[in-house]
Amino acid sequence: MTGMTGGRGLRALVAGLALAATVFSAAAQEAGLGGRARLDSAGSSLAAAGDGAVLDLRLSQAVPWRVRLLGAPPRVALDFREVDWQGLDPATLGTAAAVAGLRAGQRGDGWSRLVLDLARPQRVAQAGMTVDADSGRARVVVQLSPVDEAAFADLTDAESRPAAFAAQRPEPAEGPLRVVIDPGHGGVDPGAERDGLREADLMLTFARELEEMLLRGGGFEVALTRDADSFVSLESRVRIAHEAGADVFLSLHADALGEGRASGATVYTLAEEATDAAAAALAARHDRDDLLAGVDLRGQDDAVARALMGLARTATTPRSDALADTLVETIRASTGNMHPRPRQAAAFSVLKAPDIPSVLVELGFLSDAQDRANLTDPQWRGRMARGILEGLRRWSDADEAAAALRMR
């Protein structure tokens, strides 16, 4: 189970849920599971934990879920999509002084709800789901701890709108910012090529220079998705980011357009619909490169994983947008070289980690002579790297400040 001690803790929690759902998918399909999850009442419990309580639910399978605090009267609501509560007996589940009562039922909108009526104000101190890889059975644990009435009122006001995992609001992070740099393409996939230059080579060179600048600047931990001219699938790039505990994912590219003229840096975030025809073409190309290598991420998302990732993105998307906006400002200030529309969105698969703020930076276009000159100029690359470093610092400071405000 993952706690809530940090904005990065929220990302880790939802990452675990999304990955657990993916593991569950194969097991559930093999076992023939589907539809509603069933409550294992014998294995579930409610118990006191100091002045708080711990709810431990055992389910026949993983389902998307969320937890919220409700006021007037004080309650904790757990919504699941969805659970058959047959067999739930509050008398045998257990008791805790902090919980005055417990009830469950179907909401009629494809969701079911379990409500804990609180005897005194509580907050959700921890919440998490784990899934057994072999059986697909799930365990949900929610820990409550006491707060005063004013703090509880603030929490319920902040959670007045339905939100996935709203109780796990980010807190200010501590320690270095963990950045995963993703040099696009590599190995059998050279990317764009012009005048003897290969996108894969240029991006690896810049990624190493950016890594060195971040480490020299202090306050960063850095990992690369590749540090050689080797092929790394899109799926593996995201997996590497998860394994590194990334707080930020930066994918680096320098594409080429066959028609028209484009130049300057562009910062992309994820969008289901590309912002324009050019963005759509670039997204299709990057996805196609991965499909040609035999990896199709789209076929691996089961319904549960899709739902969980959608919930996670409700928290991550605004943070990615803020990161992209900040990078546009700092890159422009450092290099003066930006695309006329420097802030765009497209359906790049490499940006689809639901729990990590992610952006794709097109440093320029190999189809443009000036951009080619910039990408091969160490001084220009240094200015670009400084712009990215400054953008990461500004964004991290603003992100932590916003997280602190949400905790008040």
Image (cartoon, helix red, strand yellow):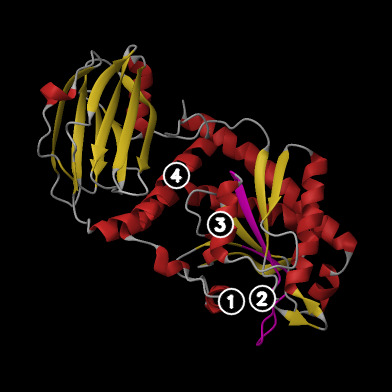
Q: Which mark is residue 189?
A: 2
Q: Position of residue 27 (x, y in %)?
A: 32, 55
Three-letter residue code for mark 1: Asp
Q: Which residue is mark 1?
A: 289
Query: Image check: 294 left or right of 97?
Result: right
Whether the magenta-drawn stretch holds residue 257 is answered as yes
Mark 2 and mark 3 lie on one chain; the one further toward the N terminus is: 2
Q: Are marks 2 and 1 in contact (CB under 8 Å)?
A: yes
Q: Residue 201's spot in the image, x, y percent?
A: 78, 70
For disc 4, the marked residue is 16
Q: Which residues are magenta?
A: 245-267
Element at label 4? helix
Of 157 and 396, nearer the camera is: 396
Q: Residues within 10 Å of mark 3 (few under 14, many from 20)?
A: many
Tell me the residue at 70%/72% (across/down).
187
Q: Residues within 10 Å of mark 1 (few under 14, many from 20)?
A: some
Q: Element under label 3?
A: helix
Q: Which mark is residue 238?
A: 3
Q: CA distance from mark 1 to mark 4?
A: 28 Å
* Chain-order first, disc 3 or disc 4: 4
Q: Amino acid at mark 3?
A: Val
